[in-house]
Image (tube, helix red, strand yellow):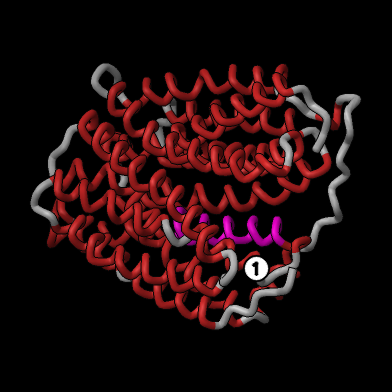
Amino acid sequence: MAIVSPVRRNLTWGLLLLVAVLSYIDRQVFTLFQDDIKAELGLTDGQLGLLTGLSFALFYTLAAFPIARYADRGDRRLTIAVCVAVWSAATAACGFAATYWQMILARIGLAAGEAGAGPAANSLLTEIFPLSRRTTIISSMLAASAIGISGGLALGGWLSQFYGWRTVFLILGLPGIGLGLVVWLLAAEPRRGKGERTIPAEQIAFGTVLRTMAGNTSLRWVGLMLSMVPLTGFAFILWGASFFQRVHGMSKAETGFWLGGAMAAGLVIGNLLAGWVSDRYGKANPRWNGWFAGLSLIAAFPFALAFIYSPSPYLALACFVVVKFTMTLHLGPIIALCFAQVPVAMRAMMSATINMIIGLAGTGVGGTLAGFLSQAFARDYADKSLQPALAILSCCLLVGGVAAIMAGRTARPLKE
């Protein structure tokens, strides 16, 4: 652990929690206003899917690895500050976009900025906090992300009562530039101080991680699961607001309040329970994690269909909470299962690879495919075209559940 005063350490933690919350607020608020953006810019659901999905995920992935590599040996405080300023300016720029391509460029800027802040923040926090608190610190960052997802909807819904979507993007984007400056001025960075300086170990190449996954039966099943489950999960997250506005006629304020609360309940409780269960039962038997993850995903499937086809918006919201809760249970145990099968020196790059697969499959493919499926069903289903689109993608939960069970059955944990 680097030598940093407790006050400076906790101040840095608090600032980076705000950064994590803001990143997901700026990302998620777009989904609340995407129908207004669609109408004003004259877009189809397919084009909207590219905006929310592939354009964001592709550039998020392309930017993440080079920025993370710099952050491993460079000034992480400056990296985070610049990334926050870039994505905040891009969020504000969404409010000025007059064409489809201008909006895509703004979304690319948002993706590039957000891609670099998270890895740099985790690297910095795990260096300045003792080992005994690191799991708590990282878990708090995940919780902050969940708060940002739900908070983006709730805050955007409240602002929609007073302002149009362009003004909301300006209101939410511009303060982040100031937060970036505060991070640069006040956050700790032991590499620039006089304290103990940690020299990072040489990184394992991305190709080595891919070869390891390809050569391990259990990790191949994990790869299939990570490619399937996000198709459903991110389709629900990215199109959930439009679903409630189109199918159930809810206002933006109602959607932001109720859907934001439902996401927060499902994600936060699910993450906390998954961590406890994995530590309690999967630590001595990592294969158990695969079974737990797989059965949780299979259990989510009927609730996903109930959410999609429920005639009542409030019953749909209740089912949505259960879906997000049961789906969230899989990721922590599966990551633990992966880590149990690779050397310690490979775990950071394995984590980055998992995030890349989830981002490309979920935001990239899932969000985009939901848009094009909705567009295809629009002729027959009109405003309810998202129902069959999301129902088709929900079947990926069953594939992912079977893959998780097989990953547990074929796991070969290494001896520590």
Which of 56 and 392 lies nearest the eye of the viewer? 392
* Residue at x 45%, y 49% (from the top left corner): 271
Asked if the stretch drawn in magenta spans residue 360, the answer is: yes
Question: Residue 149 in the image: x percent, y percent?
Answer: 41, 38
Determine the image quadrant of residue 152.
Answer: top left
Name the amino acid, label 1: Ala
- Disc tally is 1
What residue range appears in magenta?
347-365
Q: Quadrant of the N terminus?
A: top right
Residue denoted by label 1: 340
Whether residue 145 sits left or right of residue 182 in the image: it is left
Question: Residue 162 in the image: x percent, y percent?
Answer: 26, 17
Question: Residue 175 in the image: x percent, y percent?
Answer: 52, 18
SS for dot 1? loop
Which of 216 and 24 lies nearest the eye of the viewer? 216
Residue 367 in sight: no
* Residue at x 23%, y 47% (from the top left corner): 243
Q: Quadrant of the C terminus?
A: bottom right
Q: Relative to 120, does residue 84 appear above or below in the rendering?
A: above
* Residue at x 28%, y 28% (from the top left corner): 157
